[in-house]
Image (cartoon, rainbow, N blue to C red):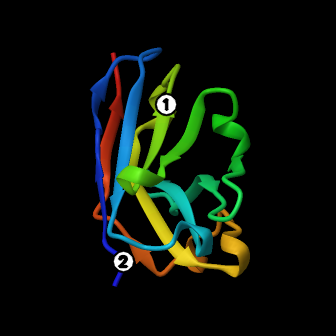
């Protein structure tokens, strides 16, 4: 059973930064895709970034490209989401998710992930 625990959310002003962490129970990185999703009130859960298990290649939705960076530390079993130049529209609950996929190739579709963290609130407001 994969367990994921997010941390690092909070209240920041527009233009500021946050780094979210997703600590995972032990598993083989080669086979697991990891994704970051967010859900704002009244909206559907949105995939914003993911990283391949096999080669570490990362992907981003257009709205966060150039501002957010996903990375992983295999030794710490942790995936990070560095969020810079935050905007009010980034306000949401942020979730990390994991699942076994061929070659660990990730997708930004929530339905493709079976394992989810509890979420961490990010609020961007002046």
Give the image location of residue 88, x and y in percent: 45, 28
Secondary-structure class at tag 1: strand
Q: Say which residue label 1 marks.
A: 83
Q: Say which residue label 2 marks.
A: 2
Q: Residue at x 63, y 36 (%)?
A: 64
Q: Can residue 93 be seen in this view?
A: yes
Count of marks, rendered view: 2
In the visual, does 119 lie left or right of 66? left
Q: Which residue is drawn at 45% across and 43% down?
A: 80
In the visual, does 40 lie left or right of 117? right
Q: Is mark 2 in CB contact (under 8 Å) with mark 1?
A: no
Image vertical order of residue 69 relative to residue 77, above or below: above
In the displayed orientation, state which residue is furthest to the front: 75
Residue 92 numbered tag: none
Category of crowding for the residue at label 1, using alpha-carbon neighbours closer than 10 angstroms: few (below 14), some (14–19), many (at least 20): many
Whole-angstrom CA distance, mark 2 to mark 1, is: 25 Å
Q: Splitting the image into 4 quarters, where does residue 66 fall? A: top right
Give the image location of residue 1, x and y in percent: 34, 85
Q: Which of 107 and 2 is in front in this view?
A: 2
Give the image location of residue 86, x and y in percent: 48, 24
On-image quarter of the C terminus:
top left
Q: Which of 44 and 33 is in front in this view?
A: 33
Instruction: Give the number of the mark in front: 2 or 1.
Output: 2
Q: Residue at x 69, y 46 (%)?
A: 61
Q: Which residue is drawn at 39% across and 33% down?
A: 19
Give the image location of residue 53, x and y in percent: 62, 64
Image vertical order of residue 45 relative to residue 102, above or below: above
In the visual, does 59 lie left or right of 78? right
Image vertical order of residue 36 relative to residue 85, above or below: below
């Amino acid at each position: 059973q994969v367990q994921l625990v997010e941390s690092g959310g909070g209240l920041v002003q527009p233009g500021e930064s946050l780094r979210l962490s997703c600590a995972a129970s032990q598993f083989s990185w080669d086979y697991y895709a990891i994704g970051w999703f967010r859900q704002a009130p009244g909206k559907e859960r949105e995939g914003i970034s993911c990283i391949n298990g096999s080669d570490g290649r990362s992907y981003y939705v257009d709205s966060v490209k150039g501002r957010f960076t996903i990375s992983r530390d295999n030794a710490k079993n942790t995936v990070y989401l560095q969020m810079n130049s935050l905007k009010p529209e980034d306000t949401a609950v942020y979730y990390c998710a994991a699942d076994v996929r061929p070659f660990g190739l990730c997708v930004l579709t929530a339905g493709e992930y079976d394992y989810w963290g509890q979420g961490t609130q990010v609020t961007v407001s002046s």
